[in-house]
Amino acid sequence: CTLELNVKDNRVVGVTSNRTLEGSPVNKGALCVKGRFGWDFIHSDDRLTTPLIKENGEFREASWDEALDLVAKRLGEIKAKYGPDSMAVFSSARATNEENYLAQKFTRAVLGTNNVDHCARL
């Protein structure tokens, strides 16, 4: 859907349709259900903002560099041992189109597999 984020004091407080696009082929300018009601997670207290690494059964906070290095190392080990088709990536409708594009590009170009899917696929 085509939407505009309503922002006050640097916080998203709502979502409305981009009325300038009325009559557009996408929902005729109306919001989809996720566009209208699926935005409140942005400022959730439960949202993770720091990477966590599990050691000895417990999570600890880590830097982004440390977390990404660990993920790259582990993915490389899995790919070397079991092959690229042993992995898959699932993306989300809560991500932007650009983020979903990058997820599939990473899956194909870096992991070397076409095993990529999306929750909104029919």
Image (cartoon, grey):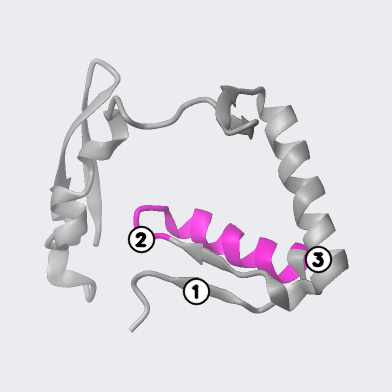
As drawn, is 38 to the left or to the right of 116?
left
Report which residue position mark 3 lands on: 79
Query: Are the residues tagged 1 and 2 within 8 Å (C-beta)?
Result: no
Looking at the image, residue 41 lies above or below residue 7: below
Report which residue position mark 1 lands on: 117
Q: Residues within 10 Å of mark 3 (few under 14, many from 20)?
A: some
Amino acid at the residue labelled 3:
Lys
Residue 84's mark?
none
Looking at the image, residue 66 lies above or below residue 103: above
Q: Secondary structure beneath disc 1?
A: strand
Q: Position of residue 77 (x, y in %)?
A: 83, 57
As drawn, is 102 to the left or to the right of 118?
right
Q: Which residues are magenta?
A: 92-110
Q: In the rendered view of the protein, which quadrant contains the C terminus?
A: bottom left
Select label 2 or label 3 by which is in front: 3
Q: Position of residue 34 (x, y in %)?
A: 20, 57
Residue 93's mark?
2
Q: Earlier in the sequence, mark 2 or mark 3?
A: 3
Residue at (23% x, 72% y) in the render: 26
Amino acid at the residue labelled 1:
Asp
Q: Earlier in the sequence, mark 1 or mark 3?
A: 3
- Mark 1–mark 3 distance (CA, rounded to whole Å): 19 Å
Select label 1 or label 2 by which is in front: 1
Q: Residues within 10 Å of mark 1 (few under 14, many from 20)?
A: some
As drawn, is 38 to the left or to the right of 120?
left
In magenta segment, residue 72:
no
Amino acid at the residue labelled 2:
Ala
For the residue pair 115 and 34, the one nearer the viewer reads as 115
